[in-house]
């Protein structure tokens, strides 16, 4: 498919054709349980974590991590991050009702969701403290910084937390802030164009 949601639709059709189980991110509990293990790992960080910036696509990553912290470290602020060119989840969360888009326009294709999963929006209630939308230029800058300072190649979707810090430095001043680097899926051309 030409985007995340189209690919999901094709996968659902293929699963039906093969009489196979289609596992949907954010709808099937296993996807949230897997993400929750990241939350359990973060609980082992020796410093007090003030804020966690979590990329939001379909919502499993956010909801899995956030559920752990809401229960075990409720004082930690949980902020959902999405690309401005694919804002459906954050717009839906802010409006408290389902909002979809006909298309997306972002390099962060791993979180470029046009049609939110209603269950994920329901799960986000009471977990999200704030939500930020970031620009593709900031995402590229974040990817470069991550690569320069850690040697990691992170795809755009995984760099949105750093992009949020770059766009809102005062918001995170004097805090211990954690973000999740998820995914390193870049083509050679993307590596060359974005990381130099």
Image: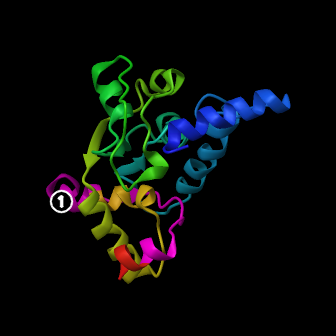
Q: Which segment is the magenta one?
A: 164-191
Tell me if residue 173 is in the magenta stretch: yes
The image quadrant of residue 144 is: bottom left
If the image is split into quadrants, where does the N terminus sit? top right
Q: Residue at x 31, y 67 (%)?
A: 140
Measured as percent of width and height from the top left, residue 116 is found at: 46, 28
Q: Against 153, is 2 above or below?
A: above
Measured as percent of width and height from the top left, residue 102 is found at: 37, 30
In the image, farthest residue toward the top: 97
Residue at image mark 1: 169
Measured as percent of width and height from the top left, residue 119 is found at: 53, 22
Q: Quick one: 24 or 31, which is closer to the camera? A: 24
Q: Quick one: 85 or 184, which is closer to the camera? A: 85
Q: Residues within 10 Å of mark 1 (few under 14, many from 20)?
A: few
Q: Residue at x 61, y 37 (%)?
A: 32
> Mark 1: which secondary structure?
helix
Q: Is residue 19 left or right of residue 11?
A: right
Measured as percent of width and height from the top left, residue 75 is found at: 37, 40
Q: How is the image coloured?
A: rainbow
């Amino acid at each position: 498919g030409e985007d995340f949601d189209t690919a999901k639709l094709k996968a659902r059709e293929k699963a039906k054709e093969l009489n196979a189980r289609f596992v949907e991110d954010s709808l099937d509990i296993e996807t949230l349980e897997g993400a929750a293990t990241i939350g359990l790992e973060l609980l082992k960080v020796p410093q007090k974590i003030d804020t966690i910036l979590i990329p939001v696509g379909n919502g499993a990553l956010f909801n899995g991590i956030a559920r752990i912290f809401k229960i075990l470290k409720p004082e930690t602020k949980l902020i959902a991050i999405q690309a401005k060119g694919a804002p459906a989840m954050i717009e839906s969360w802010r409006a408290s009702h389902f909002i979809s888009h006909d298309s997306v326009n972002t390099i962060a294709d791993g979180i470029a969701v046009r049609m939110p999963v209603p269950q994920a929006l329901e799960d986000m209630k009471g977990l999200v403290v704030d939500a930020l939308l970031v620009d593709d230029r900031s995402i590229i800058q974040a990817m470069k910084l991550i690569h320069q300072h850690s040697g990691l190649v992170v795809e755009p979707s995984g760099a949105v937390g750093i992009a949020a810090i770059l766009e809102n430095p005062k918001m995170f001043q004097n805090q211990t802030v954690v973000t999740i680097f998820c995914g390193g899926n870049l083509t050679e051309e993307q590596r060359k164009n974005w990381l130099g």
